[in-house]
Image (cartoon, helix red, strand yellow):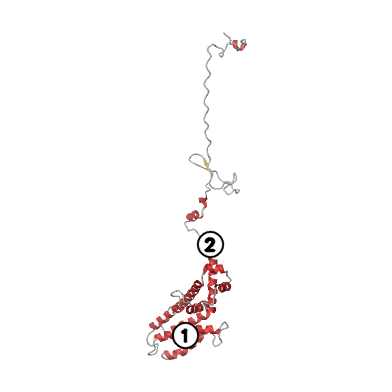
Amino acid sequence: MARSPLHGAPGPADTAPGPLNSGNREPAPPPRPAARRRPPARRERPAGRAGAPGQGAGGGGARAGPPARTPAGRARGPDRSCTAFTPLRRTAARGGVPRPPRESTVKQERAARTREALVQAAAVAFDQAGFHGTSLGRVSKAAGISMGALTFHFPTKDELADTVQLRGLTTTRDAVQRLLAGREPALETVVDVTLELAALLQEEPVVRAAARLTRERESAPEGALWPSSWLPAIEDLLEAMPAGQLRAGCDPRTVLALVAHLVAGVESYLRSCGRDGCDTYKSAPEQLARIWELALYGIRRGRGL
């Protein structure tokens, strides 16, 4: 066996027989390729806010149940998405309509009370001072409501006057219709309508304001004139009145004019009395009844009331 100059004398290991020292040495096997590492499975995180480990979505003390399994075998947490808790889905499950929030209802009720207080205060102001003598500041002070709230509901004095005038007209028309329900067209019904108008003028500031605004305003809305709430009813009663209730030669149109003058006289009488009232008679309807008793002797066949 030849020795390489780089090696020294052969040792016992070099001379001992064995597989490594045999003449025909086998080559070493090639290295095995490294196995591919599979990426770790990704866990789905819930869409909602997760609580602390072992707690529910709200972080409370109740422990959530075992998570559901997806078809892929991975664990899936409970559905905490925002859409699972919307009011619309809750109401849809009940088969109803979404209810408005309580706060919105309270605001609507407060706005309605504010508007009503402004209308009542404006009716008193228009009744006492007229359209030109009433300012928005006076109405705001009388109602105890700020000017900003007043102009929010009624930006101009004309709009406020329109509302008061229409309110007085509606109040009068409703009272007349209630009185006429089931009544026959007779002269006594005409008298009762005028007595009802006298009572409204005496007791309702919004009716007196509507009557005064009708005379003083030039820009009143069409159909908002106060006599239009009762004068057509009187005219219909006189036209439908059976023959024999009026004296011969008495024109129903003259009776209609008499009614209009009597109602205007009641309003004028109430304004002349002032805030303390009149001492002549107890009320305007009672005074008007006495006037009718005198007038009927001249237009009705037979005796008076």
Q: For mark 1, give the secondary structure.
A: helix
N-terminal-most mark, 2 or 1? 2
* Residue at 52% in and 68% down: 153
Amino acid type assigned to the residue bearing label 2 in the image? Ser
Gap in Å between the C-alphas at discs 2 and 1?
49 Å
- Residue 75 x %, y %: 52, 41
- Residue 295 x %, y %: 45, 89
- Above or below, comparing residue 97 to residue 228 in the picture: above
Q: Is disc 2 in contact with disc 1, using a CB cutoff of under 8 Å? A: no
* Residue at 50% in and 84% down: 266
* Residue at 54% in and 64% down: 107
Q: Which residue is mark 2?
A: 104
Q: Quadrant of residue 143?
A: bottom right
- Above or below, comparing residue 258 to residue 39 in the picture: below
Taking depth in this image into account, of 269 and 192 the one nearest to the observer is 269
Residue 262's disc number:
1
